[in-house]
């Protein structure tokens, strides 16, 4: 009998360990039973990794003198890009939000010079996204009113006289109710920045021509420079881009300008003065004549 009892105990199933229950009756899970997310996975899932990567790329593109202040400004304004933050208030709250978006779009547009085409185009896309954010009562997209307001802000902040840039704005602005696609937006932004640089170079050139005491230039000399600019801008309209750029650069070189100035200064008759405003308006008109309307 003792042997039989021992065999029964050997084949009897082992008692299951008692389950641990929490106060609300659910089985508690041990830490080892669940796969804990790593710190790297967490940062990637919440978007921090991509956000920091984008911020560092902006620093490399802009190469600011004070990178820490640049990053502080960047993160300070990041919330305005989210469509969920748009349209939360009624006017004047809505107007304030619109001004904030315009300011942030301008900040992005100025991060890279327009000659750095890849970086500039990326910043244009971000600016377009900022202005296209929708709210509860607004569909996503950019209207002509916001687009035109941004063009005016760019020209005004660029320091160009209003009379100089007004013809360009009339040419590339859109109607308030028109939808502005990204390619039109990009063309308008690029045209504005190129014109501002063109006017700044023309202003520096006039400073070399003017009489310091009278703040005016000889009209013959000023007109000779304008004629040279016109010839350079009209060079090879149908030629390939590299050849056109080389020929235009040669016409604006020191030798060509010196010859034009010598011919103008050789006149014997006295010439009437030309003011800076007139010179800039005529120089800008040469540039604007080459711009095609975008809307």
Image (spheres, grey):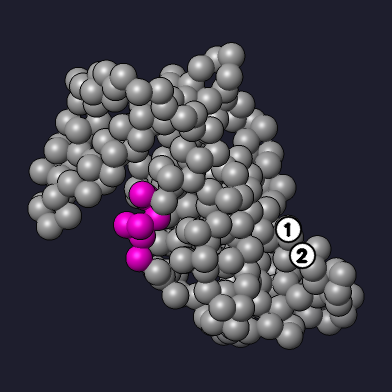
The residue drawn where x is 65% and y is 66% is 82
- Name the residue beneath numbered marker 2: 97
Q: Are marks 2 and 1 in contact (CB under 8 Å)?
A: yes
On the image, the x and y values in percent for residue 220 come to 36, 29
- Name the residue beneath numbered marker 1: 100
Q: How far apart are marks 2 and 1 (CA)?
A: 5 Å
Considering depth in this image, is 19 or 58 the residue closer to the camera?
58
Considering depth in this image, is 91 or 248 the residue closer to the camera?
248
Name above or below for residue 149 compared with residue 272: below
Q: Where is residue 85, by image quadrant?
A: bottom right
On the image, the x and y values in percent for residue 198 come to 42, 40
Farthest front residue? Answer: 269
The residue drawn where x is 76% and y is 75% is 87
Name above or below for residue 170 compared with residue 285: below
Q: Is residue 259 magenta?
A: no
Q: Where is residue 270, by image quadrant?
A: top left
On the image, the x and y values in percent for residue 263 come to 23, 23
Name above or below for residue 56 compared with residue 142: above
Quadrant placement of the C terminus: bottom left
On the image, the x and y values in percent for residue 189 come to 47, 57
Q: Where is residue 3, by image quadrant?
A: bottom right
The residue drawn where x is 53% and y is 33% is 275
| Magenta-highlighted residues | 286-292
Under tag 2, what secondary structure?
Answer: helix
């Amino acid at each position: 009998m003792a042997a039989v009892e021992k065999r029964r105990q050997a084949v009897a199933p082992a008692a299951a360990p008692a389950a641990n229950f929490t106060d609300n009756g659910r089985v508690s899970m041990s830490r080892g039973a669940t796969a804990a997310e790593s710190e790297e996975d967490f940062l990637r899932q919440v978007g921090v990794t991509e956000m920091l990567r984008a911020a560092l790329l902006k620093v490399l593109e802009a190469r600011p003198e004070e990178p820490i202040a640049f990053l502080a400004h960047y993160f300070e304004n990041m919330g305005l890009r989210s469509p969920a933050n748009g349209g939360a208030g009624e006017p004047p709250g809505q107007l304030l939000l619109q001004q904030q978006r315009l300011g942030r779009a301008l900040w992005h547009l100025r991060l890279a010079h327009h000659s750095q085409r890849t970086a500039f185009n990326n910043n244009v896309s971000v600016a377009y996204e900022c202005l296209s954010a929708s709210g509860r009562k607004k569909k996503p997209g950019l209207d002509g009113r916001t687009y035109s307001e941004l063009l005016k802000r760019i020209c005004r902040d660029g320091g160009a006289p209003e009379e100089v840039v007004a013809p360009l704005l009339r040419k590339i602005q859109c109607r308030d109710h028109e939808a502005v696609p990204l390619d039109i937006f990009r063309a308008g932004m690029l045209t504005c920045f190129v014109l501002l640089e063109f006017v700044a170079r023309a202003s520096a050139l006039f400073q070399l021509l003017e009489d310091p005491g009278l703040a005016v230039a000889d009209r013959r000399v000023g007109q000779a420079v304008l004629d040279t600019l016109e010839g350079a801008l009209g060079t090879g309209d149908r030629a390939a881009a590299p050849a056109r750029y080389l020929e235009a650069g040669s016409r604006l070189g020191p030798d060509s300008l010196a010859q034009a100035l010598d011919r103008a200064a050789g006149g014997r008759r006295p010439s009437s003065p030309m003011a800076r405003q007139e010179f800039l308006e005529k120089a800008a008109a040469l540039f604007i004549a080459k711009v095609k309307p975008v809307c």
